[in-house]
């Protein structure tokens, strides 16, 4: 069958009106099999401009697919309100009414599923808590439990956040307001990447940034910058109201990896047995915008890492919307890819149960800032004390090793071996494979000359014959070391304990490799620079260098803790 013949099997309707109960009209594209049949409906709601194609395989599998611009975006009416506001948005009710609208269409058999990732996934969760009668299953992936998880411990992440505001959200708002362009996402991204990126990434103070955004976005951005600890999604309440199972995808390098927490909470709090027992999670060596690909950054994780999300989604909906006995309901709750081994494993929940703790204590002769220094990871605390020190200068931060896309991705850390402000601690070559799965953690005893500062910890798989691949990382802002909701300022020069939980991972350190730990104080522009003043880093422009001192001894047992499988 030719492509033209295959296309003739599919009916495409553009900008179909979907009326809401308050009079606002949303607009949708419909892709459905030709003829008079009735099929399960699949709904994607998005603020990014509804897709106008790419669903041939899904439609030919027997589904009617509807993609919809959310309220106030692109062809839809109403006013856009972002998901960072206090008190909620109209999106939950809009989603509920859109599901029920789809169920009533002559081409739909009354069974509806929802799909999409990131912001589109958030929209699914919000409508699911209202329990539309015709919603049967979800495929919502890559959205953390709370907006504050995207920005850690009071740290602003300018690379992703500012590019998102300027490249993804602002253009359509400018168009709707009649303001000067760019009016299209592609144009805005081109300007960002080829002309203005460095201007905005080094912008200060961040609280002035709203002046350069369109009116319909500026106020929300300023409100978010003034209340960065606000938790507005409240998933603790959402899961208890959801009746349908969800299929989630994530990656070890996904900046929205907090999505992995949904499955455990659904297993505990889902409103129905189906929601509790049938929710699923697949985790690969992927990042946010490259889910399913075997290649991430400079690394190829092998053929087993390649994963077809659309095929998995079709199989998921075949089970729940068509009743096919394809085994989906009997599969493990979690499937995850173990980097280093090239193999997939399964578990009943996330993180997997049955891990033990492997502890590695930091030690050196005081020269861990040198790439070939004596920084080491030991089985027990060192009896003596030779603290390591470095200068963290926010005018010269450790650069994030990313592409221009500015999505988290694995990198070869050897590229930063020239930096004197990164401490490196290593094990000897491991004699047998070490497999860590879960959340690595660092307990760090450190002092600083500053009133406030940051500490970063990064776990690295160091291949003696090849790259040093970062596996997981975490950070802590000193004033928020106990809680994001309160400020506990440190005493300069005093040794203080910090606990740094890293991003989730599953990695097998092969025999002959070294487990490497890096300690530093910046990762820019992935995270904003701590100004070291103790003031509001989002409101200030003053930058002060700090002397950082990391202690490791029996009195100050700085250590790396890996959850390992026997």
Image (tube, rainbow, N blue to C red):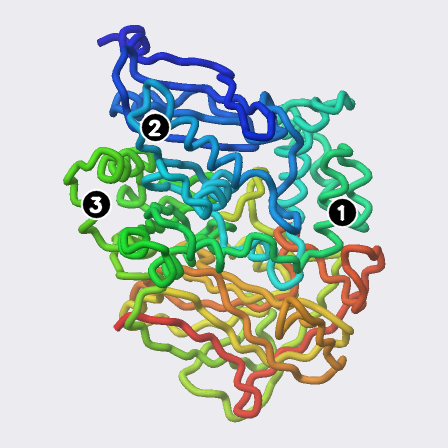
Q: Which residue is mark 1?
A: 222
Asked if disc 2 and disc 1 are in contact, CB closer than 8 Å, the reply is no
Query: Residue 354's spot in the image, x, y percent?
Result: 28, 72
* Above or below, 5 relative to 448: above
Residues at circles 3 and 2 in contact by the CB criterion of under 8 Å: no
Q: Say which of 125 and 211 sits in front.
A: 125
- What's the distance in space between the residues labelled 1 and 3, CA to CA? 45 Å
Image quadrant occupied by the N terminus: top left
Determine crowd level at label 2: few under 14, some 14-19, many 20+ residues with C-alpha closer than 10 A. many
462 or 1, which is in the foreground?
1
Rendered residue at 66%/75% (across/down):
389
Q: Nearer the viewer, residue 261 or 442?
A: 261
Residue identifier under label 2: 41
224 is higher (above) or lower (below) than 123: below
Q: Is residue 277 left or right of residue 496?
A: left
| The C terminus, quarter of image | bottom left
**Which residue matches tag 3?**
328
The reply to whether callout 1 and callout 3 are in contact (CB within 8 Å) is no
Q: Indicate which label's residue lies in the foreground, 3 or 2.
A: 2
Mark 1 Cα shell of 10 Å, populated few (<14), some (14-19), many (≥20): some
Residue 480: give x, y in percent of width and height.
66, 70
In the figure, residue 429 lies in which quadrant?
bottom left
Element at label 1: helix
Residue 192, x across and y down, in percent: 67, 33
Identify which residue is drawn at 19% across, 37% down: 323
Using residue 473 as the reference point, say whether residue 37 is left or right of it. Answer: left
Residue at (35% x, 36% y) in the render: 134
Instruction: Say if residue 298 shows up in the picture.
Output: no
């Amino acid at each position: 069958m030719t492509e033209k013949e295959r296309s003739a099997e599919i009916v495409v309707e553009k900008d179909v009106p979907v009326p809401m109960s308050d009079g606002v009209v949303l607009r949708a594209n419909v892709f459905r099999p030709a003829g008079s049949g009735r099929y399960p409906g699949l709904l994607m709601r998005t603020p990014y401009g509804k897709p106008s194609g790419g669903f041939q395989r899904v439609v030919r599998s027997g589904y009617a697919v509807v993609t919809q611009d959310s309220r106030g975006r692109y062809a839809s009416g109403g006013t856009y309100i972002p998901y960072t506001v206090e008190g909620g948005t109209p999106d939950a009710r809009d989603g509920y009414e859109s599901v029920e609208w789809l169920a009533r269409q002559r081409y739909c058999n009354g069974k509806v599923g929802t799909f999409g990732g990131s912001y589109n996934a958030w929209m699914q969760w919000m409508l699911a808590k209202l329990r539309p009668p015709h919603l049967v299953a979800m495929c919502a992936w890559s959205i953390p439990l709370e907006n504050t998880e995207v920005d850690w411990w009071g740290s602003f992440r300018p690379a992703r956040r500012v590019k998102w505001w300027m490249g993804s959200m602002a253009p359509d708002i400018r168009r709707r307001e009649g303001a000067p362009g760019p009016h299209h996402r592609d144009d805005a991204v081109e300007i960002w990447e080829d002309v203005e990126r460095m201007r905005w990434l080094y912008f200060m103070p961040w609280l002035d940034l709203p002046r350069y955004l369109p009116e319909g976005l500026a106020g929300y951005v300023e409100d978010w910058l003034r209340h960065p600890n606000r938790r507005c999604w409240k998933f603790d309440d959402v899961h208890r109201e959801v009746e349908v199972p969800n299929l989630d995808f994530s990656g070890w390098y996904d900046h929205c990896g907090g999505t992995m927490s949904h499955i455990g909470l659904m297993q505990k709090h889902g409103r129905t047995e189906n929601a509790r027992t049938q929710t699923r999670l697949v985790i690969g060596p992927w990042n946010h915008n490259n889910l399913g690909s075997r290649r991430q950054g400079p690394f190829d994780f092998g053929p087993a890492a390649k994963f077809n999300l659309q095929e998995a989604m079709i199989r998921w909906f075949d089970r729940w919307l068509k009743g096919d006995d394809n085994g989906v309901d009997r599969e493990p709750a979690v499937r995850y890819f173990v980097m280093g081994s090239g193999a997939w494993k399964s578990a009943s929940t996330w993180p997997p149960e049955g891990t033990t703790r492997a502890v590695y204590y930091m030690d050196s002769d005081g020269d861990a800032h040198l790439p070939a220094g004596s920084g080491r990871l030991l089985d027990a605390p060192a009896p003596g004390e030779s603290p390591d020190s470095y200068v963290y200068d926010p005018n010269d931060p450790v650069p994030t090793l990313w592409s221009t896309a500015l999505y988290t991705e694995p990198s070869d850390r050897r590229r930063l071996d020239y930096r004197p402000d990164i401490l490196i601690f290593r094990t000897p070559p491991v004699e047998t494979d070490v497999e860590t799965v879960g959340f690595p953690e660092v307990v760090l005893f450190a002092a600083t000359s500053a009133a406030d500062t940051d500490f970063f910890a990064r776990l690295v798989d160091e291949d003696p014959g090849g790259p040093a691949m970062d596996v997981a990382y975490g950070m802590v802002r000193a004033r928020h070391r106990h809680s994001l909701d309160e400020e506990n300022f440190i005493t300069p020069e005093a040794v203080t304990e910090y606990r740094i939980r890293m991003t989730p991972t599953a990695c097998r350190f092969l025999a002959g490799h070294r487990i490497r730990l890096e300690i530093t104080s910046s990762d820019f522009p992935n995270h904003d620079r701590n100004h070291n003043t103790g003031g509001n880093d989002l409101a200030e422009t003053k930058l002060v260098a700090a002397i950082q001192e990391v202690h490791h001894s029996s009195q100050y047992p700085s250590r790396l803790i890996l959850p390992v499988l026997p």
